[in-house]
Amino acid sequence: MRRLVAALRKTIWPQLFAIAALYGLGVLTINGSGSWRSVQAVCVLASFVGIAAAGQTVVALLGGIDLAIPGVIAFANVATAQLTGDHWPFWIVAPGILILSAAVGAFNGAISKSFNINPLIVTLGVSAILTGAILVWTGGQPTGYAPKWLNGFVAPSGTTFGLPLPPVLAFWGVVAILLVVLLRRTVFGKHVYASGASLPAADLALVPTTRVWTLAFALSGITAAITGILLAGFTTQGDPRIATPYLFNTIASVVIGGTSLVGARGGYLRTVLGAIILTEITTLLVANRFSAATQQVLLGAIILAVVATYGREQAVSDRL
């Protein structure tokens, strides 16, 4: 049994089987869930989680967790709708939001690594500051209006070059390819895995670990900001409360996909599958009228089951 579990950890077949099984269950229990339009809708919802979890994946490979993601999403979401609603050009607003979000993420990574502070503490504090500032800015109410073209970009009924593929899914595909290449085929990616495997060993090998942590958290800030911008188009307005589920969802996608939270094992392809699985589960629970409390209990039970399988491995540094 141990050998079987160890073998399954190294493949994505359990995740692919889960996606197929959940799809079949949806077809049996939800009218119309097998249609292409329904599949598109689920994938679009999964894309928001998947893009937000892209940076979380990189941070998890370092052995950390970024709790500032909801704050950055809320900031990007509100700022996009508010500023473009006030007739600011999107081509000025979006780069500004991405730069500020990258700076927030870089701060989180640099402070955590330089002062040897658990990133949970740093990112939680930064997220609280961002969330509070946005609530003061908006009064906790929806605000602004997103550009109409952004509404079409994230619409499940959208097309890409005439094909029945929503543009946001094509965009997610590009993000996935770039991140997989970044982690598997670049020096930065090798440094991420080395730092996550053993930080002292990485330092002795002259890996610039502080720079790696800074860039990894900056990337997490950027992907969270992109999610916030896309969500502004999806909801047509800026809503400071829209980011609340993404703290749990990004971590859940990483874990369900099979990336270890102790660092150095896994990758973004797994997170993509995890985001789809999580969205399918949520869709089934909502469609079958489970209460919000019951949904949380069931999702929590699923996370515990997955962690029991993937989370009991020793860290790479403990096995060397």
Image (cartoon, rainbow, N blue to C red):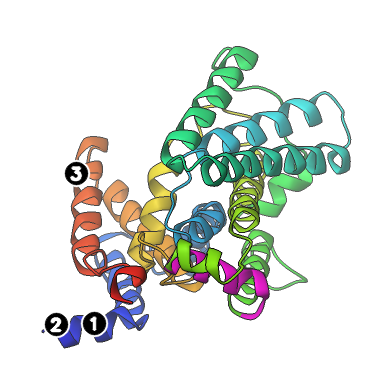
Label 1 crowd (10 A; few <14 / some 14-19 / many >=20): few
In this view, the residue in front, 105 or 302, is: 105
Magenta span includes 192? yes
Residue 125 relative to residue 75: left or right: left
Question: Label 3 belongs to which residue?
Answer: 297
User: In the image, residue 313 lies at what x, y percent?
Assistant: 25, 70
Closer to the chain start, of discs 1 and 3, is 1
Task: Return the residue nearer the eye: 241 or 265.
Answer: 265
Residue occupying the point 43% across, 60% down: 275
Name the quarter where the C terminus is drawn: bottom left
- Is residue 162 rendered to the left or right of residue 225? right
Which residue is drawn at the image coordinates 64% and 35% (left, top)? Answer: 77
Q: Main secondary structure of the magenta part?
A: helix
Q: Amino acid at mark 2?
A: Arg
Under mark 1, the amino acid is Ala
Q: CA distance from mark 1 to mark 3?
A: 27 Å
Q: Is residue 216 above or below residue 294?
A: below
How far across and down, in percent of the image, does residue 160 sit?
Answer: 73, 68
In front of the other: label 2 or label 3?
2
Q: For marks 2 and 3, give the CA distance.
A: 28 Å
Where in the figure is residue 12, as x and y percent of width and height? 37, 80
What are the residue bounds of the magenta stretch? 185-197
- Front-most of residues 73 and 214: 214
The magenta stretch spans residue 87: no
Q: Which residue is mark 2?
A: 2
Residue 268 visible in the current orientation: no
Amino acid under label 3?
Val
